[in-house]
Amino acid sequence: MAYRNDNENLKVRLKYCQGVIALLVLMIAGLGVGWDRARQEAVIHLPPNLEDGAQVKLNQPQRSHIFAFASRILQVINHWQSNGATDYGKAIDSVKPYLTPRFYAELKYDLEQRLINPVDGTGTAVDELTGRVRSMQILLASDHKIFADDRVTARGQGEWVAQLDMHIEEQVKGMLVKSVNVRYPVRVVRYDVDLNANQWGLALDGYADPGPTRLSQQPAAITLAHPKQLPTPGNRP
């Protein structure tokens, strides 16, 4: 009788262990599916100054990151090495992953208008780009800093407006034809489409109102930020 009771208890324990094993298998399978569907990469935005440490969250860019992203992409678009007629289009295409489709189309339209632009009021086509060299640099604020928190406004729902004060110079055949300071209110949006092409998960979405505005301050009185190497399409801007 004692042997029979022990045998029955053993059967019950085996069934219990089998149930636990089956539950664990289901849990592991669920974790495997979740892991497979999870992102292979996570974007972490670190603040520029880590002397005092920092608390960061995944996919949560700070104002400084929005400003750096917008200014770098805008500089690439406005960097025409030798001939604006070809360099402008190449620059736009090189940063296509960092532009929304709408803003990409706007820039392409601007390229077409600059190539054939009736600026004299009589309908005569004037080419604004051929042979033109263009460069853009960030202007330092009155406190000699490139960035301040008030230069970026959060609009919620993954949208920001970065106010960029830039100095633009253009030359044709070595002759300076333009030297102006312009304020660009650039709209930046969360754009988590393809992390292989755009690790930032951000994109420029055009200009906020009132659009690019020429600053009254003369270029000679402006302090330029120290120029740095422009980013390439494959690197983070």
Image: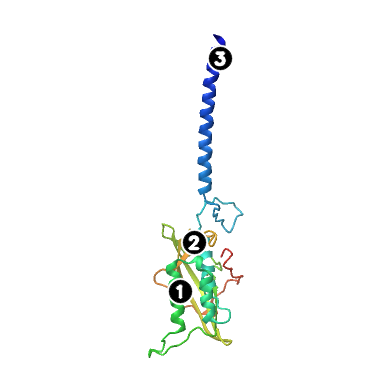
Which comes sooner in the sequence, label 2 or label 3? 3
- Where's residue 189, x and y in %? 45, 62
Q: Is residue 173 visible?
A: yes
Q: Quadrant of the N terminus?
A: top right
Badge 1 is on which residue?
A: 107
Q: Image point 53% across, 43% down: which residue?
A: 32
Q: Secondary structure at mark 1?
A: helix
Q: Secondary structure at mark 2?
A: strand
Badge 2 is on which residue?
A: 202
Q: What label does residue 6 carry, if any?
A: 3
Task: Return the residue found at the far top.
Answer: 1
- Where's residue 138, x and y in %? 54, 71
Residue 62 or 116: which is nearer the viewer? Answer: 116
Q: Secondary structure at mark 3?
A: helix
Residue 222 or 79: which is nearer the viewer? Answer: 79
Q: Label 1, label 2: how many angstroms apart (C-alpha)?
A: 18 Å
Indicate the quadrant where residue 209 lies.
Answer: bottom left
Q: Amino acid at mark 2?
A: Leu
Q: In the displayed structure, would residue 100 be above or below residue 52? A: below
Q: Is residue 75 visible?
A: no
